[in-house]
Amino acid sequence: MLSQQDDVLFSDVRLQEDTDYFIYIGELKTDGLNEFVKENLSKIHQKKFDYISVIPDVMESYPHRNVLVINPLASTLLAQTRKKFSCRISPGDFAGVVSYSSTVLDLVRFLVRKQGRLYVHVFESLPELTFTRMPGVVLLGPNGQVASMWNNKLYQLQMLKDTVPVIDYKICSGVREMVGSMDEAVRAWPDGVFVSRPYSAAGTNSFIVRSIEDFNKQLPLPQSTYFISRYVPHEFDPTVLGVVGNEDDVFIAAIADQEIEGGNMFRGSTFPSVLPFKEQLEIKEHTRMVGRVLGRSGYRGIFGCDYIVSKDGEIFFVEVNARKQGTTMEMCCTLENLLPEESPSLMELEYYAVTQNRLPSNKVEIKEAISDLYWRTYNFKVDREVMTRYFLPLEEDERELFRQVRKNGIEHKMIILEHVGHGCSVKPGTFLGRVLAVSRTREILDREIRQGRRLLEESITGTG
């Protein structure tokens, strides 16, 4: 049993003598992947495993025991106002505070002494997660320095311009150079100009302008390097999940269609993709080639690639996500239900990639078109500070939901995931919850998602 310390907002860690533990570092939205990791480690090492989740999410309740919540901003707001706040912390900042947490470091040292080896599972490998370099600690994910290098969009474009179809772009060394280039860019690219800083995700640090007036509304901007690129009108935003075992062995899981709001803000995904089979094959091959380039640089583990498909069917590469994607859990559940029973999960593939520099020989990719398993997700972020009125509890385990629809004859079902709970102030840009709809037919998904969004909207009121 570990005592709660000042750097921890919440802890219910209780360790069992007959169990080995791994630690998960990341947001609650991918915490469900730990069940796959747990099963994989238990199978490989022939012993009982469980996990401790170190997360920043402030919730009314958590889906399992052994949760450790670290969120300095939420802790400060609680001390100042005596109110519970749900607020996001950037992945890099979170990795840094976790690495300096005396509670986490004491736990790591204790588990290494007890077990001889401690696995650490992460949503995203980051250089700031320094404790993963301690003796006896094994990171179940790509090297943090290599992943950070590949998450730089300028690096991606320069390294992959001869591998995949890249949209026309220009690098600007600062705001002044970008301002000087914008007149020409707007004239040359009348459909719009996409502006981004090297590190951006889900709509942050990027925007689209279609005129100088649009651009002037964004000023002043931080002093930084930017790149500007031609905005391509398109109908589809496919995303692909894969695993790099080495430079010669890349696994492609599946393709989903992203839901993008405002031209650059990710809100969810739908599976399977509605793209024609030919375009899907082409996108998979592009992704495999990207994975091989990542593999040559030393990258090992799960990654994602995003694309756009123009109205005339032309495919363009958008970015690499050198980490797990937001729908990795849904992809794991998909593969579990569509592939042969003994096929390795994505978590097992990543384990062998990271620890043995290879993928297991019994891996299986999806080859046929999907006809009886469909899903869609929606991430509900608030754009203003709100107060939650009541709690929307998780009615069903996500993994079990997929099994019921696929194997038990249930036609469709929708669940709310990670609702923050009642009586909580939710800061702008924070997830209120996520909606997941799973069905045996595509047509029902939109209705189910609308219902979930309505339930989430009704659970909040006014400002916090």
Image (cartoon, rainbow, N blue to C red):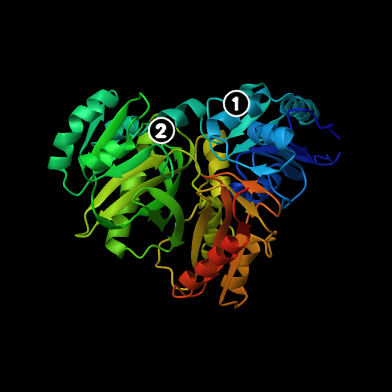
Q: Which residue corresponds to the image point at 51% horizontal and 54% vertical from the top-left?
A: 379
Q: Residue 58's image quarter?
A: top right
Query: Which residue was labeled with disc 1?
Result: 96
Q: Amino acid at mark 2?
A: Tyr
| Residue 302 image position (x, y, % from top left) | 49, 42
Res. 199 mark: 2
| Rendered position, 133 above or below 86 | above
| Residue 339 image position (x, y, % from top left) | 52, 62
Of residues 350 and 443, the one drawn nearer to the viewer in this rendering: 443
Res. 459 mark: none
| Rendered position, 129 above or below 332 | above
Considering every residue shown, the one lying at the far front of the view is: 462
Q: Is residue 344 left or right of residue 393?
A: left
| Residue 196 image position (x, y, % from top left) | 33, 36
Q: Is residue 270 left or right of residue 167?
A: right
Q: Decide: few, some or many residues near mark 1? Use Cα within 10 Å; few <14, some 14-19, many ≥20.
A: some
Q: Amino acid at mark 1?
A: Gly
| Residue 29 image position (x, y, % from top left) | 59, 49
Marks 1 and 2, how far apart at CA: 17 Å
